[in-house]
Image (cartoon, rainbow, N blue to C red):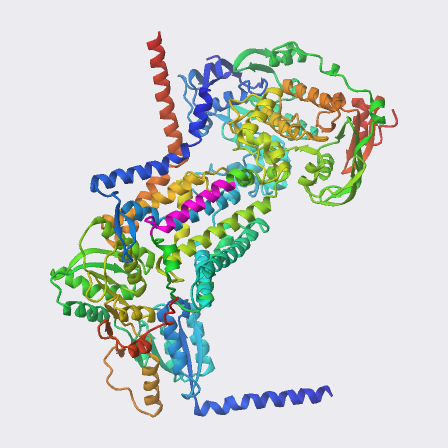
């Protein structure tokens, strides 16, 4: 009797394994190494984007791993290689330490795509890197601001955490304007992405009585903090008001502020890299090569900037991140 | 009589450092800008009259820190260690608050009250968790609270499941900003309320005596019938309530919670406030008013640096210099030296008057 | 400076705010002598030692040591050591988790490198030569208190020490250990070290010292050779009046006590620290637990008070069955407990005398019923007066009081709760003769008023004077109960030692 059960069990196990074994031929096995969604609203959207694109319906068998620790990411990547994935998609926690793993992947014939974050390594080790160009985000925003053709530009510049990619990129373009004298720096201070701190910075400018007509906050939260300070001081802001308010990241609630005319501009930082990568994988699977890549193999995400005067409901639903505003 | 008087004065000598710090900042700012502390009445964008000025900014901005340092004082005194998870716990509490607000369609005063009670309850449970690690298992407070410090913000994220949920309501605005018609920022009023509650607590219960007894000599306190474990636990639960209030204010200020940045690093400032307030970080005797003054001194420093438009990259360095000075000022070595100098002056004066009398 | 003199202090003054702690005090120490420094608590012994070791700066006077031409100023214990003045304190200030050798040489190695072998060899030689029963590689915490103390002394002696200060070295040692220490002291004396011996034990002074310097109220009473100063006269000098004959304290008639109703009774009471035992005490009775250190006498009373987790037994209070598992239970049943270790279990050092006095009463009243400031002040004043507690004000932290006065504050704390049954574990340890007598008298007076008191003391004499019934313990068991005529020193000794009590 016992023997019978054992045999039955073995048969059941074999049967249950078979579909997977057969499936390997017609689905594309993908391992995704990313940062955890709790990191930020941006990351949450990014994670969801990959989950939504690399589905069974689209012909993928995708496994996901999330960690903010580089070494955990590295061992997860090794595990994916051992598991025999076809493609490895990586948003690395740190830019270094990946050479060995990427070489292993190459030797195993696994195609590697980097997304969102670059890795310091020989571009030969990966197929392509789909990343944002933070500096370009800043240039787009500053370009928009110059287009407003204000008589004077007295800017309160609220920075993100000093040294972060986003801060460096979004600060660069504005610093050029300050240096050229086209715009005047009223204050340039870091709120380290903290909304409440941003409010305090703007409060202190208001208290000092310095004149300003632009608030350039390097993310939506800090812009919201700045606006709260304006509201308390009775200073109007938004379309055709006293102060121009600019933010980044395109959270849905921030775009709603644009829609209501309370803010003027929001710059996108696209978390949507999955479709681009999926398209490239299909090219490779069809036996083709990815064309139009430069030496660094970087594919820059297309990123927009939204103007309160032209934003549409569709824009908000398409490009807005996170949950929509519930009005209480 | 004379002796008693001196004893009475020296009881407050620990407040000297935070008071001097505040005084120096006040003088410095007045020299830099004589109108620095002027307070004006303006109308906000809702048309309500509100008070405005750096003084208000300091008092208002320090609210969360003041409330947390009140609770931190108790934990420090009773357990001889600090809770480093207050920022994370405030984020959890804030997250619970937001969750409740978003649960029921429109935001009614009752829902807000329910949200507050709920976030208090959750924060008290987490406080009790920290407290039981410290009280029952005798784990060092910093190590015990390291657990929540590490995972607290993830828990906060998990409660709402979104990165920066927003809530918009006039009631929330009234809590975090101004009550229509009342020109004083509500967080300042909440601080006053909390201060009043603590004053009543110390006036009408023996909590202060018990906490100090446990903090100074747990064994002796136990042999005098004090439930030392219970007192330690209680101090953490009270700190939990403080975290809930701070979290609620933090969320209400902007009607938004960012789990990663809400009251980030505030635990260090709260501990610092306790230390600047002249309280022994090793536990024992405490003066809550010292911590409160310490908290305002820290906030005054921050606002001063903003007003001076110190470059972003240098802010931390400036803060560090001032804080080193404050901590050194409050150190036993400097205190002893100061004591010696005052004694000598006193003696000199006494011999002087004696000579005159002769 | 004369050939054989190693240390002279002349006209030393030390003023604390409002108090003249030392007033024109002289002190001379000769080579190879053991010199006892005697005085009641607050007489200035500790202050003098602290001036000598650089803990306090002196306000006037001069200090000279052998080998230095001019008068010296000592600013820190380190400087004192450089002049050859070493101290071993009452509380041993070594590191229990290091080895004996490490403790002897820690902080004294040159250039940051350690030659472990040489260090252990040197330590071994030193321990041998001083006859200290410890091995260099033994962890210090594994040694007995006495040996730890001796290691501390060895460490002090090894730093080319001319003057060795022993501050209450015997207060936590048993007789055998004291004898061991005395042997070491005599050995050091033979090597020419001058030893300053601070103690409360009169017998020990007479056993080991050559000279005695007596202080009272911060002033020098005199310096005497031991042979020429009878014990009674010494005590009289210390307390500043002719000594009342202590033994005349009137003790109640033991047969009367036996008839009194039982106030507290325990049957097979046990705690995590004590074995099951039976015990009772009558109304107005004073009884005591006696036995050697570690015999379980303190553990027994701790079980009565619920200080250690109670594991079994039945307790009745005035005939009613009660449950006492934690101190608060005992307090609610009218039991008070003055613990053996005042510093560890008694005082809340940083709190004021007032708060320390009201603490137990306050706890009994409950968290929601604080005693008002005015009332607390009144209570404190009352007991400060009643027990003659020497303190600058009710606001003074108890930690800054002398040991005897701290003990009185703890006593006041319990008296304020008006207990029916008061347990006093070593209430007179480390306390001067005058206060000792006061406490003994107080105990008898309280008993007369109907309070039951259990009294524990290492000094059998003291117990014989106060207790009408003695419970003798050996090896954590009760081995005898003595009353009436059995209450003699030799009887108690024999019972403690085993098998002797009945035979005489």
Magenta region includes residue B200: yes
Query: x and y percent of residue A117 in the render?
Result: 32, 72
**Residue C277 to residue C51: above or below:** below
Instruction: List the single residue furthest toward the right.
Output: C503
**In the displayed structure image, the side of residue B332 where residue C164 appears, left or right:** right
Looking at the magenta stretch, what is its main secondary structure?
Answer: helix
Q: Which segment is the magenta one?
A: B181-201
Frontmost residue, C91 versus C439: C439
Frontmost residue, B282 versus C290: B282
Query: x and y percent of residue A169 in the render?
Result: 24, 66
User: Residue shown at 38%/45% (left/top)?
Assistant: B295
User: Residue shown at 57%/28% (left/top)?
Assistant: C375
How many marks overall?
0
**Residue B145 to residue C32: above or below:** below
**In the displayed structure image, the side of residue C64 where residue C379 appears, left or right:** right
**In the displayed structure image, the side of residue A284 where residue C389 appears, left or right:** right
User: Residue shown at 25%/82% (left/top)?
Assistant: A293
Quarter of the rendering occupied by the C terminus of chain C: top right
Query: x and y percent of residue B333 in the render?
Result: 39, 33
**In the displayed structure image, the side of residue A19 where residue C70 appears, left or right:** left
Magenta region includes residue A222: no
Q: Does residue C172 show up? A: yes
Frontmost residue, C56 versus B19: B19
Query: x and y percent of residue B228 in the render?
Result: 59, 43
Q: Does residue C16 show up? A: no
């Amino acid at each position: 009797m016992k023997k019978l059960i054992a045999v039955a069990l073995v048969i059941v196990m074999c049967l249950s394994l078979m579909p997977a074994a057969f499936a390997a031929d017609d689905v594309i096995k993908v391992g995704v190494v990313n940062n955890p969604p709790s990191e930020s609203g941006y990351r949450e959207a990014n994670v969801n984007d990959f989950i939504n694109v690399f589905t069974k319906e689209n012909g993928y068998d995708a496994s996901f791993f999330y960690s903010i620790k580089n070494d955990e990411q590295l061992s997860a990547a090794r595990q994916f290689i051992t598991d025999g994935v076809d493609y490895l998609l990586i948003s690395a926690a740190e830019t270094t330490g990946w050479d060995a793993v990427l070489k292993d992947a190459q030797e195993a014939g696994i195609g590697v795509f980097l997304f969102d974050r670059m890795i310091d390594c020989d571009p030969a080790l990966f197929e392509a890197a789909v990343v944002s160009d933070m500096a370009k985000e800043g240039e787009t925003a500053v370009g928009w601001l110059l287009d407003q053709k204000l008589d004077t530009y007295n800017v309160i510049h609220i920075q993100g955490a000093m040294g972060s990619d986003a801060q460096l990129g979004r600060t660069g373009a504005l610093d050029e304007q300050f240096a050229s004298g086209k715009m005047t720096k009223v204050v340039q201070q870091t709120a380290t992405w903290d909304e409440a701190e941003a409010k305090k910075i703007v409060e202190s400018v208001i208290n000092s009585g310095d004149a300003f007509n632009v608030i350039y906050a390097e993310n939506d939260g800090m812009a919201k903090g700045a606006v709260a300070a304006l509201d308390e001081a009775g200073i109007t802001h938004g379309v055709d008001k006293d102060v121009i308010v600019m933010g980044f990241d395109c959270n849905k609630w921030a775009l709603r502020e644009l829609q209501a005319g309370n803010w003027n501009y929001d710059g996108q930082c696209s978390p949507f890299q999955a479709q681009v990568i999926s398209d490239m994988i299909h090219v490779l699977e069809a036996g083709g090569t990815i064309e139009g890549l430069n030496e660094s193999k970087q594919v820059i995400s297309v990123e927009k900037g939204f103007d309160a005067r032209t934003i549409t409901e569709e824009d908000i639903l398409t490009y807005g991140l996170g949950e929509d505003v519930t009005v209480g | 009589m004379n002796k008693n008087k001196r004893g009475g004065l020296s009881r407050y000598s620990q407040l000297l450092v935070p008071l001097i710090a505040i005084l120096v900042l006040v003088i410095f700012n007045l020299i830099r800008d004589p109108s620095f502390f002027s307070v004006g009445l303006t109308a906000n964008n809702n048309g309500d009259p509100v008070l405005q000025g750096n003084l208000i900014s300091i008092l208002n901005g320090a609210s969360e820190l003041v409330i947390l340092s009140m609770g931190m004082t108790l934990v420090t005194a009773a357990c001889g260690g600090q809770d480093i998870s207050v920022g994370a716990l405030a984020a959890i509490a804030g997250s619970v608050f937001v969750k409740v607000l978003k649960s029921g369609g429109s935001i009614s005063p009752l829902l807000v009250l329910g949200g507050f009670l709920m976030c208090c309850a959750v924060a008290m449970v987490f406080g009790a968790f920290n407290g039981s690690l410290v009280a029952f298992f005798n784990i060092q407070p910093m190590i015990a609270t390291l657990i929540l410090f590490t995972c607290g913000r993830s828990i906060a994220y998990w409660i709402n499941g979104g990165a920066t949920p927003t809530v918009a309501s006039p009631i929330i605005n009234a809590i975090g900003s101004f009550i229509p018609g009342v020109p004083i920022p509500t967080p300042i009023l909440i601080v006053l309320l909390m201060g009043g509650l603590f004053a009543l607590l110390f006036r009408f219960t023996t909590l202060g005596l018990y906490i100090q007894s446990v903090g100074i000599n747990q064994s002796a306190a136990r042999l005098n019938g004090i439930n030392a474990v219970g007192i330690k636990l209680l101090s953490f639960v009270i700190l939990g309530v403080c975290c809930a209030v701070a979290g609620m204010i933090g969320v209400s200020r902007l009607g938004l919670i960012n789990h990663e940045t809400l009251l980030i690093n505030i635990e260090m400032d709260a501990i610092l406030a306790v230390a600047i307030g002249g309280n022994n970080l090793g536990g024992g005797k405490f003066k809550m008013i010292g911590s409160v003054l310490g908290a305002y001194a820290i906030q005054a420093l921050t606002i001063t640096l903003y007003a001076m438009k110190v470059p972003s990259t240098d802010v931390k360095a400036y803060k560090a210099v001032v804080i080193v000075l404050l901590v050194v000022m409050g150190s036993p070595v400097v205190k002893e030296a100061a004591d010696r100098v005052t004694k000598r002056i006193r003696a000199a004066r006494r011999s002087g008057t004696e000579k005159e009398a002769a | 400076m004369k050939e054989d003199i190693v240390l002279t202090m002349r006209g030393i003054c030390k003023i604390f705010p409002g108090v003249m702690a030392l007033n024109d005090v002289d002190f001379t120490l000769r080579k190879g002598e053991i010199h006892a420094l005697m005085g009641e608590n607050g007489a200035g012994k500790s202050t003098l030692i602290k001036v000598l070791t650089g803990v306090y700066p002196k306000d006037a006077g001069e200090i000279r040591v052998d080998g230095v031409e001019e008068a010296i100023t000592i600013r820190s214990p380190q400087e004192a050591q450089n002049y050859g003045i070493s101290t071993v304190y009452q509380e041993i200030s070594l590191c229990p988790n290091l080895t004996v050798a490490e403790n002897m040489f820690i902080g004294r190695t040159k250039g940051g490198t350690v030659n472990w072998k040489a260090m252990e060899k040197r330590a071994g030689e030193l321990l041998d030569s001083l006859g200290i029963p410890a091995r260099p590689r033994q962890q210090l915490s594994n040694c007995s208190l006495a040996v730890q103390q001796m290691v501390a002394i060895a460490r002090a002696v090894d730093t080319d020490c001319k003057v060795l200060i022993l501050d209450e070295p015997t207060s936590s040692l048993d007789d055998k250990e004291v004898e061991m220490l005395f042997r070491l002291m005599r050995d050091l004396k033979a090597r020419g070290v001058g030893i300053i011996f601070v103690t409360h034990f009169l017998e020990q002074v007479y056993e080991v010292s050559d000279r005695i310097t007596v202080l009272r109220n911060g002033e020098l009473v005199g310096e005497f050779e031991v042979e020429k100063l009878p014990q009674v006269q010494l005590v009289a000098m210390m307390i500043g009046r002719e000594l009342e004959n202590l033994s005349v304290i009137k003790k109640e008639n033991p047969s009367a006590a036996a008839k009194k109703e039982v106030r507290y009774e325990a049957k097979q009471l046990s705690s995590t620290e004590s074995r099951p035992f039976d015990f009772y005490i009558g109304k107005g009775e004073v009884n005591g637990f006696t036995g050697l250190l570690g015999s379980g006498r303190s553990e027994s009373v701790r079980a009565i008070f619920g200080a250690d987790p109670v594991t079994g037994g039945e307790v009745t209070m005035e005939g009613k069955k009660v449950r006492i598992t934690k101190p608060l239970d005992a307090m609610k049943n009218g039991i008070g407990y003055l613990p053996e270790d005042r510093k560890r279990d008694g005082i809340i050092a940083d709190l004021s005398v007032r708060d320390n006095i009201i603490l137990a009463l306050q706890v009994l009243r409950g968290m929601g019923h604080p005693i008002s400031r005015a009332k607390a002040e009144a209570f404190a004043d009352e007991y400060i007066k009643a027990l003659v507690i020497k303190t600058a004000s009710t606001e003074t932290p108890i930690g800054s009081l002398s040991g005897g006065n701290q003990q009185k504050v703890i006593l006041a704390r319990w008296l304020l709760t008006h207990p029916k049954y008061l347990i006093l574990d070593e209430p007179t340890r480390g306390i001067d003769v005058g206060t000792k007598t006061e406490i003994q008298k107080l105990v008898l007076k309280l008993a007369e008023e109907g309070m039951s008191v259990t009294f524990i003391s290492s000094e059998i004499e003291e117990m014989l004077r106060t207790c009408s019934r003695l419970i003798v313990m050996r090896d954590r068991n009760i081995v005898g109960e003595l009353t009436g005529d059995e209450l003699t020193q030799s009887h108690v000794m024999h019972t403690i030692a085993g098998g002797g009590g009945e035979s005489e």
